[in-house]
Image (cartoon, helix red, strand yellow):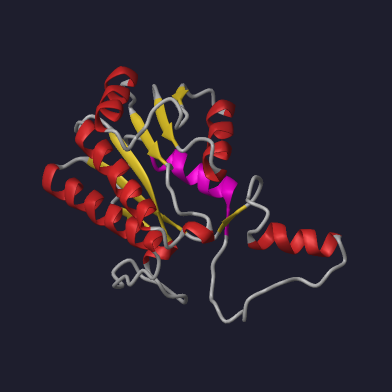
Amino acid sequence: MTKVLVTGASGFIGLNFLKLLRSNQINFFAPRSSEVNLCDFSQTHRLIRECNPEVIIHLASQGVKHSDAHNKECNTKNVGMFENLLKSITPDHTLCVTGSMAEYGFSGTHKEVDKCFPTTQYGLSKLQITDLARSYRHSLNFDIRIFRLYGVYGYGERPERLFPSVIQALQNNVPVKLSDCEQERDFVHVDDVCRLLLELSKKNIRIDLIL
């Protein structure tokens, strides 16, 4: 792997992924949102042309915070960023994009073929991106790989998320604030997610959708 372009590198998964790239001595480029606006096609196209990565790991996303999950603007920006990437890559690139369990819109056991009914703008944007990715992959034979992530936790999580909030409550000897606990969730550590992204982004592996 000669060069990796990482979008959203300042986020929870992105920061951990960069640590893994460094430890494996992999050459990468991780521009900040203040340096490149992926919602602008000309900037995105120039980034791909000048960086010329072998692999693109697209982690940039808005609406991850619960307070932003229903924001239609986040939906528009998420889909717009991905469309600009699609218009900028060539069949020589490998594009890896992260989806979300929010695409399904319901808890429980999911299958890849299950119909999705997202209940948030964030989930809807991720589903639209998944559909776009699969369409480009099959119609244009682009190497696009989709990773639908579930309950990622670990170092760098926002304090209001489940595990940090439970740990903080226990440390302060106060009651843990929880929901009705009727949801069914799977959790995966961020280090495992990063290792998976790295291994399954290699050129010699052909995949369609990872759940």
Place of residue 148 in the rendered image (x, y in percent of width and height, measured from the top left)? 40, 56
**Figure quadrant of residue 120:** bottom left
- Picture quarter with the C terminus: bottom left
- Picture quarter with the N terminus: top left
Q: Which residues are magenta?
A: 188-201
Place of residue 50 in the rendered image (x, y in percent of width and height, measured from the top left)? 31, 17
Q: Nearer the viewer, residue 195 or 81?
A: 81
Q: Is residue 106 on the magenta stretch?
A: no
**Figure quadrant of residue 82:** top left
Whether residue 9 is visible to the viewer of this picture, yes or no, is yes
Residue at 30% x, 49% y is 79
Relative to residue 107, is residue 180 drawn left or right? right
Relative to residue 106, is residue 180 drawn left or right? right
On screen, 100 above or below 190? below
How many labels, in total?
Answer: 0
Place of residue 179 in the rendered image (x, y in percent of width and height, measured from the top left)? 63, 76
Relative to residue 164, is residue 180 drawn left or right? left
Q: Nearer the viewer, residue 202 or 88?
A: 88
